Amino acid sequence: MPPPRKHLFICTDTDCAPKRGSKETYGAFLEALKARDLVDEVWVNATNCLDGCGFGPNLVVYPDGVFYYGVRPDDVEEIVESHLVGGRVVERLTTYGE
Amino acid sequence: MPPPRKHLFICTDTDCAPKRGSKETYGAFLEALKARDLVDEVWVNATNCLDGCGFGPNLVVYPDGVFYYGVRPDDVEEIVESHLVGGRVVERLTTYGE
């Protein structure tokens, strides 16, 4: 089976991630992709620890290998439109740290 | 932060995956990579459903975008040596189906 065009993995199941709102961010991606009818070509999965535990919610977009840190539900539309649709990385969310 | 050289995601947390031995396969990858001192350059994460629920344990290797299906602990050494170290896909495990 071919891979999806973009595949996003977001940390949700450690002790720290849910406390930092990762499940809300995960849900916001699912909703944003569903609203654009993109769920077949852009997949979103919940995963365990991706490092950077203190400044999540953290996620990675493949095949690009781009990590995003501290992604709040309010950031989701920008990542979807800029990166997942337009192919432009949202640089302001790629800093490893608070 | 740069992405790992290879990043493997294996489905473990749905109703079906653990029953099919996904946690043992996940553990076998962790052990095989640790034994080779590869844990910094090859990451392994547990994820939720990757599709193909009836014929897991299923996993995907990025940035390659290669899906493997029905991966048992006995298959792990071959995937590590051939694909993750040698760069050669293990074609016999890429068939979507039983």
Image: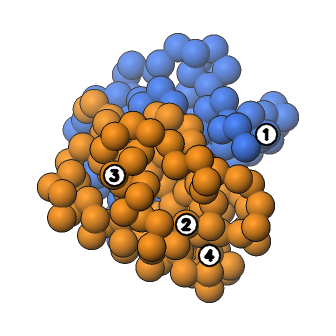
Chain colours: A blue, B orange
Q: CA distance from mark 4 to mark 3?
A: 24 Å
Say if labels 1 and 3 share a chain. no
Q: Which residue in the structure is indicated by mark 1? A: A40
Q: Chain of mark 1?
A: A
Looking at marks 4 and 2 on the same chain, the residue that comes earlier in the sequence is marked by 4
Label count reads 4
Label of residue A54 in the image: none
Determine the secondary structure under disc 3: helix
Q: CA distance from mark 1 to mark 3?
A: 32 Å
Which numbered mark, 1 or 3, is in the foreground of this view? 3
Say if labels 4 and 1 share a chain. no
Q: Which residue in the structure is indicated by mark 4? A: B17
Residue A81 seen from this side: yes
Which numbered mark, 4 or 2, is in the foreground of this view? 2
Q: Is residue A56 above or below residue B5?
A: below
For the residues labelled 4 and 2, say whether their Cβ atoms are less than 8 Å apart: no
Q: Is residue B96 above or below residue B19?
A: above
